[in-house]
Amino acid sequence: MAAVVRVRDLRKRYRRQDPWAVDGVTFELEPGQAFGLLGPNGAGKTSVVKMIGGLLRPDGGDISVFGSPPGEPRARAQLGFSPEDPDFPKFLRASEVLDYFASLLGLDEADRRRRIPETLAFAGLEGERRQIRQFSKGMKQRLGIAQAILGRPKLLILDEPTADLDPLGRRDVRALIESLKQSGVAVLLNSHLLSEVERVCDDVAIMAKGRVLREGTMREVVPEGSTLEDVFVRLVEVSQPQRDHMPSFITEKEPRS
């Protein structure tokens, strides 16, 4: 089975004098597989996601998406991407945003009439008449996921998709990922919510300081009796010194009057 995404020795840094933001990352993503990309802030996860999506140029290594370089029309046509902080024109309504993306996708009128209401319903935005300027962060996040799935992608990239969602919203995203996997869609998930990743991902890579510390199936990465959070903390603690403990003034006793 041909890999949907193949990443080999990927490297990126933003200034010549800086350390590598992404340093030798290698992994593959297969059809029907959910792959979790994990790491603390600054680990390089979002840089990897942007390079796969063709939004950022690598400084070394190789990426192929459906056998083509990222950003090529063949790759773009099969990819859906929901960024961490979706940004849409503030004067538009949710249905107008999806209609705009439908036009970019080349959907005909019949497809628009069917897909847009169904996608809005999935996102919990059906009947929503307010402009984007009045949306909460969670509503914008749901609209970002809605536009990402509108074109029925074969690769869906979700960058922190559940960060601002309530428990019901997170449940719906999990159900979406499971449904897409069963349809053969590959899902690349970048998230800080380790419990969510553990529930939906088949494989994970844990990153810190631009490098992959451990990569494999969930069973390979998480020993029996442990959790993904336990493994994550142990690995990342080795690469990053523990922060100072509680400030002393917090535990100081008030002087008696």
Image (spheres, helix red, strand yellow):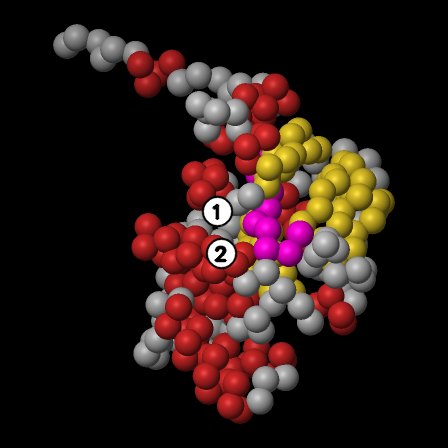
Mark 2 residue type:
Ile
Check the image and report above or below for 130 versus 201. Answer: below
Residue on which disc 2 sits? 177
The residue lying at 84 percent from left, 45 percent from top is: 61
Check the image and report above or below for 221 versus 200. Answer: above
Q: Position of residue 215 (x, y in %)?
A: 65, 34
The quarter of the image holding the N terminus is bottom right
Mark 1 residue type:
Val
Q: Which residues are magenta?
A: 30-41
Q: Is residue 32 magenta?
A: yes
Q: Position of residue 41 (x, y in %)?
A: 57, 37
Q: Position of residue 109 (x, y in %)?
A: 53, 91
Disc 1 secondary structure class: helix
**Number of marks in the rendered image:** 2
Q: CA distance from mark 2 to mark 1?
A: 7 Å
Work out whether residue 15 can be spotted: no
Q: Is residue 103 magenta?
A: no
Circles 2 and 1, Cβ within 8 Å, touching? The answer is yes
- Near mark 1 (Cα within 10 A), the count class, few <14, some 14-19 or many ≥20, is many
The quarter of the image holding the C terminus is top left
- Near mark 2 (Cα within 10 A), the count class, few <14, some 14-19 or many ≥20, is many
Residue on which disc 1 sits? 200
The residue lying at 45 percent from left, 43 percent from top is: 199
Q: Earlier in the sequence, mark 2 or mark 1?
A: 2
Q: Quadrant of residue 165?
A: bottom left
Residue closer to the observer: 135 or 30: 30
The residue lying at 59 percent from left, 60 percent from top is: 184
